[in-house]
Image (cartoon, rainbow, N blue to C red):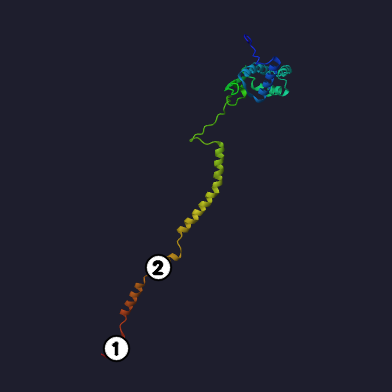
């Protein structure tokens, strides 16, 4: 029975318990998130949070104190270089426990313990203000430069097209020289020539009539 005992022994002797918590603290500092049972996570939170507070003051003494608990130079350097600057403004509560349900084998209550400042989903960083684009207002500078470049590229093409249109218009306006000749031929029908020839024949008197007049 553990009536009135504040420390959970976790079914281990003190040396075994301290070694286990030290290893769990090293893995949590390295990976920023681990999965374990709720009882171990609560014991680890009590074990590691004082060390996180100690890491805020970067001095030789504080590094030696933290190393006496973690027994890992890599974990100490990671703690003082990367984690300490992020938790500098936080007054406490560096760890978060998220319950995941019960384990299938022994039905132990499982959870995930993580560093609060290293959860990218829950950390709300200030978003950059985006400039609103209105239809009335001008577009952004990048769009304006693109539009100016496209205009410069299209300008010579438009000039060539305008010259071609002018040439086609001049061709349509100037009629061909052979056209009036064909029209003149069409206007003078062959029937008029035949009528004129008949009229000339009627005007010239016959020679027989002249001979009859001379005999008389």
> Which residue is the site of mark 1?
211
The quarter in which the N terminus is drawn is top right
Residue 100, labelled with which disc?
A: none
Corner quadrant of residue 36: top right
Question: Which residue is farthest front?
Answer: 105
> Mark 2 falls on what kind of element?
helix
Does the image show residue 90?
A: no
Please give the name of the residue rendered at 65% of the width and 25% of the height, measured from the top-left corner: 31
Which residue is nearer to you in this view: 22 or 133?
22
Instruction: Residue 51 in the image: state x and y as whole percent.
Output: 68, 17
Q: Is residue 15 left or right of residue 172?
A: right
The disc label shown at residue 184, or none: 2
At label 1, counting other C-alpha atoms closer than 10 Å, the crowd grade (few under 14, some 14-19, many 20 or more) is few
For residue 73, say whether it is visible: yes
At label 2, counting other C-alpha atoms closer than 10 Å, the crowd grade (few under 14, some 14-19, many 20 or more) is few
Q: Quadrant of the C terminus?
A: bottom left
Mark 2 or 1: in front is 2
Task: Measure how far apart labels 2 and 1 are at the Cα level.
Answer: 45 Å
Q: Position of residue 68 (x, y in %)?
A: 73, 17
The percent position of residue 176, horizontal first and vertical second, equals 46, 63
- Give the camera-side residue of 141 and 68: 68
């Amino acid at each position: 029975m553990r009536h009135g005992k504040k420390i959970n022994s976790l079914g281990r002797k003190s040396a075994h318990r301290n070694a286990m918590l030290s290893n769990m603290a090293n893995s949590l500092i390295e990976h920023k998130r681990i999965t374990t049972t709720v009882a171990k996570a609560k014991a680890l939170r009590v074990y590691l949070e004082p060390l996180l507070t100690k890491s805020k003051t970067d001095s030789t003494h504080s590094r030696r104190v933290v190393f006496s608990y973690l027994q890992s130079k890599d974990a100490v350097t990671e703690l003082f270089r990367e984690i300490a600057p992020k938790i500098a403004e936080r007054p406490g509560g560096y760890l978060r426990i998220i319950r995941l349900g019960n384990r299938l084998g022994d039905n132990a209550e499982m959870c995930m313990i993580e560093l609060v400042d290293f959860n990218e989903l829950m950390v709300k960083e200030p978003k950059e203000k985006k400039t609103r684009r209105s239809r009335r207002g001008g577009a952004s500078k990048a769009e304006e430069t693109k539009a100016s470049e496209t205009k410069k590229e299209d300008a010579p093409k438009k000039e060539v097209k305008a010259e071609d249109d002018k040439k086609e218009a001049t061709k349509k306006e100037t009629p061909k020289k052979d056209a009036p000749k064909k029209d003149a031929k069409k206007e003078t029908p062959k029937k008029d020539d035949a009528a004129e020839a008949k009229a000339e024949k009627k005007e010239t008197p016959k020679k027989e009539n002249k001979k009859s007049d001379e005999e008389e």
